[in-house]
Image (cartoon, grey):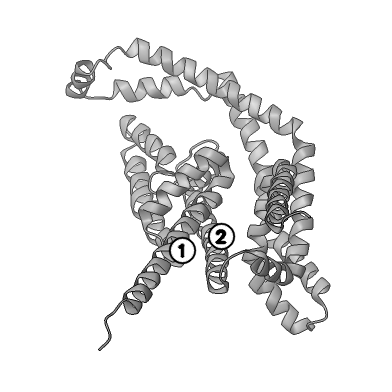
Amino acid sequence: MISPQLQRGFFLFLLAAVTVAFFWILLPFGGAVLWGVALAILFNPLYKRLLAKMGKQRRTLAALATLAICLVIVFLPLSMIAASLVQDVATVTQRIRTGELNFVNYFQQVVGALPRPLLNLLDRFGLGNMEALLSKLSTTAAQGSQMIAQQALSIGQNTFDFVVSFFVMLYLLFFLLRDGADLSKTIREALPLARPHTHYLLNKFTTVIRATVKGNVVVAGVQGTIGGIALAVLGVQGALLWGVIMAFLSLLPAVGAALIWAPVAIYFLATGAIAKGIGLIFVGVFVIGLIDNILRPLLVGKDTQMPDYIVLISTIGGMALFGINGFVIGPVVAALFMAAWSLFATSNETADAVGERDNAPPL
């Protein structure tokens, strides 16, 4: 006879092995799965409204309608921006190759406009050798243009993988919308946790994903749009490209978009375009900066109930490890970490209170 302990131990081993194998199989489509889950959580309220109007028995129709609305709201604008961006990138790359856009010359103009005391200060810190700096800048610009070309070639070569991942995400999104409630119930019943703890952790998971995607995407979109419009009004070439880059950099809280508009403002001030420089600084500090400082805590920190510094560190760490997907993964991991330790501390306090009550002397 095989002992029950041995049977249970083997079963737990088998359960862990097939779980690891399953996630290993999903790893090539990790981004598609992540965004399918995130969009399903984000559009689930809309699905419920449509289901209430169409009838409880028309889940497939409600899921298809929600998927169509998601395509119109999210993917159609993104595809239009991507098409314009490809053309803008090609134009900017061509201007860099022909020398029409020469960042070394821009840097020389900024250096030439610096006052003598500031140049002396740079000399004191060993930064006064402008020829060496220009050489390094030229090398960096050449490497940057080469990297852009390689990335463009890589995107072209990986178009098939992107298309496959995109349709996997849409396919998964449809079934998560239609069968998400049943799947959530199955997960809650399968997790070996107390029912209140399971509900708390799953609710925290969905809340953080909804707040992170909604908050970061809204903030990044608004900052990139305002920054791109400001650069276009000021006559900066490739304003759409720089606006999109600002939107991506805005996923890094506090300093993201400033990495683009601040050097442009310095160039304007150094070359005598004082009004343009001051105007761009005003927009960057009092419009783009306030959007980050006001909207992000409201849309991200408020719903997740996490301190701003935790949101900042987890976002940066997540993006460093997982790329663009990390701005969702980082805060989710941080929120679940805080929630799990909160439940652990609460259970310890409850156990201590019960122990003190049982050991209390009789009256």
x, y percent for residue 190: 67, 65
- Crowding around mark 1 (Cα neighbors within 10 Å: few <14, some 14 to 19, many 20+) is many
Amino acid carrying label 2: it is Ile
Q: Residues within 10 Å of mark 2 (few under 14, many from 20)?
A: many
Task: Tell me residue 222's x, y (percent).
Answer: 50, 55
- At 70% from the left edge and 27% from the top edge, which residue is drawn? 153
Front-lying residue, 295 or 225: 295
Separation (CA) of disc 1 from disc 2: 9 Å
**Residue located 53% across and 54% down the image:** 221
Identify the residue at image location x=28%, y=24%.
113
Q: Looking at the picture, how far across and down is residue 44, in whole percent?
A: 66, 70
Residue position marked by numbered label 2 in the rendering: 209
Q: Which residue is mark 1?
A: 304
Q: Earlier in the sequence, mark 1 or mark 2?
A: 2
The furthest residue to the left: 117
Query: Residue 194 location, x and y as percent?
Result: 56, 70
User: Residue at the spot x=53%, y=69% of the render?
Assistant: 197
- Mark 1 residue type: Thr
Q: Is residue 242 visible?
A: no
Q: Confirm or deny contact between disc 1 and disc 2 (CB under 8 A).
A: no
